Image (cartoon, grey):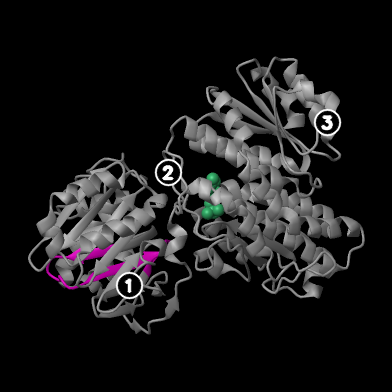
Amino acid sequence: MCGIIGYVGDRSAAEILISGLSHLEYRGYDSSGVALMNDKEVNIYKAPGKLINLIEILKTKQNICAKSKIGIGHIRWATHGLPTTQNAHPHTCNCKNLTLVHNGIIENYQELKKELEQLGARFSSQTDTEVAAHLIAYEYGKTKNLLKAMLNATKKIKGAFAFCAIHKNEPDKIVVAKRNAPLIIGIGQEENFIASDIPAIIEYTKKAIYLSDYQVGVIKKDSIEIYNDNGTLVPNKIEYLPFEAVAISKMGYKHFMLKEIHEQGDVVRNILAGKLLSPEKNVVLDEFKLTKKEINNIKRIQIIACGTSYHAGLVGKYILEKFAKIPVDVEASSEYIYRDTIADKNTLAIGISQSGETADTITAIKQIKEQESHVAIITNRVDSTLARLSDSLLPVNAGIEVSVAATKSYIAQLISLYLLTIYLFEQKGLEQYKEEIRTLKQELMELPSKIEAIVENTTNIQEIAKKYSCYKDFIFIARGINYPNALEGALKLKEISYINATGYSAGELKHGPIAMLDNNMPVLALLNTGVVYDKVLSNCEEAKARQAKLIAVTNYIEPKDVPLFDDIINVPLGSETIGPAINIVVLQLLAYYIAEYLGKDVDQPRNLAKSVTVE
Ligand code: F6R
């Protein structure tokens, strides 16, 4: 959460910082700020709200912007204190010589604050970051050296952080440090960059150093020095960044979310390429590192994830248990980490995360690694912390996802889970459902064109979105393998339109939620062919009897059942197993068009951030 950027070189730092922050807005966007340094001074500018407010301020500071060739910037997702100018980063110390931006949470900030107050520090914000600024400044007072001050200060700090600091007395450098929060140093020609994520700097360089936990870096325009926590210089490990700049443009779509929904056909093609060649051939999954013997020894699977990725994991449970015959638990990472969990070397742990930086999932995966389980990570970011923790890395290759609401990464995670399931089935040499597995492979290959058929004709969805956008509440119901999509569809709607939407297993409706039903409560049912068709239909009847407005998203509906529904959205036919990968596209579009119709900030919904790097 929050975005960090830094620049040192010969160009106007302000321009690079603003451009970088605009690519990091998806990480947080409730306030922003920059510190611009030249030989004589450091100038700090901050603004609450969207980045545009900061840009407006900088327009009036052209002189300072032109002469400042070094700077640090930050875009905030508030953790401590309201999103005000005072709480926006950068933060500084009493003498204002030290300036700091920070991503993460300092857990012992209250103790540190008390100690620093006794030493004379005066605080003007409610943030934990300001405490770190005072602490580094205090250490600077003892050492008169920013590198040493950072090394000493970070030893006293508990929690997660990526820091970027500058000091008026050392106007040629930025000093950085990190622990459990990502930070990369982009390498240019006579210029260097710092960012919490690749999109901020990819247009300037493809070469970078990933700072490791407990390291401190000193970045000048013509040198990068990395030290370990005892102050020893370590060799620079240069890597190549994986993204193209074009991937972060809207390409003519009104919102990134719509673009990303439209990309899903290609996302599926990409992930299947080289892995699923024909329904007759076995799935190739070289990235999965367990041998046949080890696969046969897997006694259980634990899937760990948050939010949308958690919903993908729930679909995974249905298919892995049915086809691979392995018991699966799916748990929200935040729940996994504060209890005594049981796992061992015969447990396969699967962490699912679009960003690969979700703090709760990282903590849970570290916990499970200690229990010697094999850790497979399904992620969109091969450069992420979770990717680095994996034993088997299963990249979903969905391309950068900018919209805060996850769409294409969800489909990609589902496809990854389908492939893994088929792979385990085939490696175990199982017989039951052999024909279904062949059909599933066929359907996976046909999936891109089915997705494209949905996104290319959205008239009906748009009309229904308009009709239902006035409702304040929504219920999504489904059963079986589509149940996780009821949760995901409701999540999509609530996060971008702020409509109170809840997903329920259709069978659970009568155990409580039915009390809420009346003609002000639309119920959207995922009605697919398969064993639960009649059951979902009965639950719809029960809802209708309470005068709820009923919408069906269906791949097949018996003509006799049509009159039950107020509105119907048809999706292409497919088996029960492939259903979630098809009908989710409709739910994403429905949420999108409702939010768009209500004039909401679709790509950057309030209070959210793309990458949740705090626990
Ligand atoms: C919802 C959404 C979030 C994320 C969750 C986990 O649209 O995007 O619920 O799914 O924060 O993030 P990752 O997948 O990056 O671990």
Instruction: Answer yes or no: is residue 106 visible.
Output: no
| Picture coordinates of residue 361, whole percent (x, y) | 55, 56
For marks 1 and 2, the one nearer the N-term is 1
Mark 2 surroundings: few (<14), some (14-19) or many (≥20) residues within 10 A? many
Residue 562 figure quarter:
top right
**Cα–Cα span, label 3 and label 1:** 59 Å
Residue depicted at 33% across the width and 82% down the height? 232
**Cα–Cα span, label 2 and label 3:** 38 Å
Tell me the element at label 1.
Answer: strand
User: Which segment is the magenta one?
Assistant: 164-184
Left or right: residue 498 versus residue 87 is right
Q: Please say whether residue 272 is one of the residues in the magenta stretch.
A: no
Furthest toward the right, the residue is 431
Left or right: residue 511 versus residue 72 is right
Asked whether 390 or 300 is in front, the reply is 390
Residue depicted at 48% across the width and 35% down the height? 596
Q: Please say whether residue 165 is one of the residues in the magenta stretch.
A: yes
Residue located beneath label 3 in the image: 535
Residues tagged 3 and 1 counted as in contact (Cβ below 8 A): no
Task: Establish if 129 lies above or below 274.
Answer: above
| Picture coordinates of residue 306, whole percent (x, y) | 57, 49
Residue located beneath label 1 in the image: 216
Q: Nearer the viewer, mark 2 or mark 3?
A: 2
Asked whether 115 or 349 is in front, the reply is 349
Mark 3 surroundings: few (<14), some (14-19) or many (≥20) residues within 10 A? some
Residue located beneath label 2 in the image: 604
| Picture coordinates of residue 390, whole percent (x, y) | 60, 68
Residue 540 figure quarter:
top right
Instruction: Answer yes or no: is residue 474 visible.
Output: yes
